[in-house]
């Protein structure tokens, strides 16, 4: 799971931010959050990530796709 940055300016804000560590997610909630926060990368990523372009530029080398 990605890390969060804490930008607290006061002790009360820090306490609230640290309180978030006590939150427990169900098994489906992280997937729902990932879906809600997903962005489309668009051109040129979509073109470069295609199978045809990978075959031409990587010569059959398998490169793991990042999310």
Image: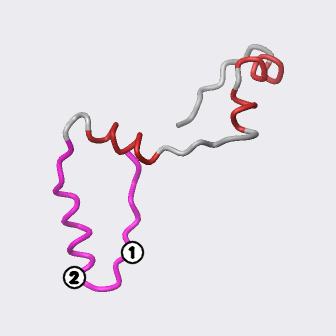
**Percent position of residue 47, x then y:** 75, 31
Q: Which residue is mark 1?
A: 7
Q: On screen, 14 above or below 45?
A: below
Q: Quadrant of residue 65?
A: top right
In x, y percent, where is residue 31? 34, 37
Q: Position of residue 66 (x, y in %)?
A: 56, 35
Residue plotted at (60% across, 26% down): 64
Please tell me which residue lies in front, 37 or 6. 37
Q: Quadrant of the N terminus?
A: top left
Residue at 39% from the left image edge and 75% from the top image edge: 7
Of callouts 2 and 1, which one flags the residue occurring earlier in the amino acid sequence?
A: 1
Disc 1 is placed on an element classified as loop
Task: Read off the residue under disc 2.
Answer: 12
User: Residue, x 39% and y 54% (percent of image)?
Assistant: 3
Which residue is farthest bottom?
10
Q: Secondary structure at mark 2?
A: helix
Q: Nearer the viewer, residue 60 or 31?
A: 31
Instruction: Give the image quarter of residue 59.
Output: top right
Q: Residues within 10 Å of mark 1 (few under 14, many from 20)?
A: few
- Magenta-highlighted residues: 1-25
């Amino acid at each position: 799971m990605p890390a969060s940055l804490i930008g607290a300016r006061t002790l009360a804000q820090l306490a609230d931010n640290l309180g978030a560590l006590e939150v427990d997610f169900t098994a489906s909630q992280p997937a729902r959050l990932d879906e809600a926060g997903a962005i489309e990368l668009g051109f040129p990523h979509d073109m470069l990530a295609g199978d045809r372009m990978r075959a031409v530029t990587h010569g059959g080398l398998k490169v793991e796709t990042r999310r």
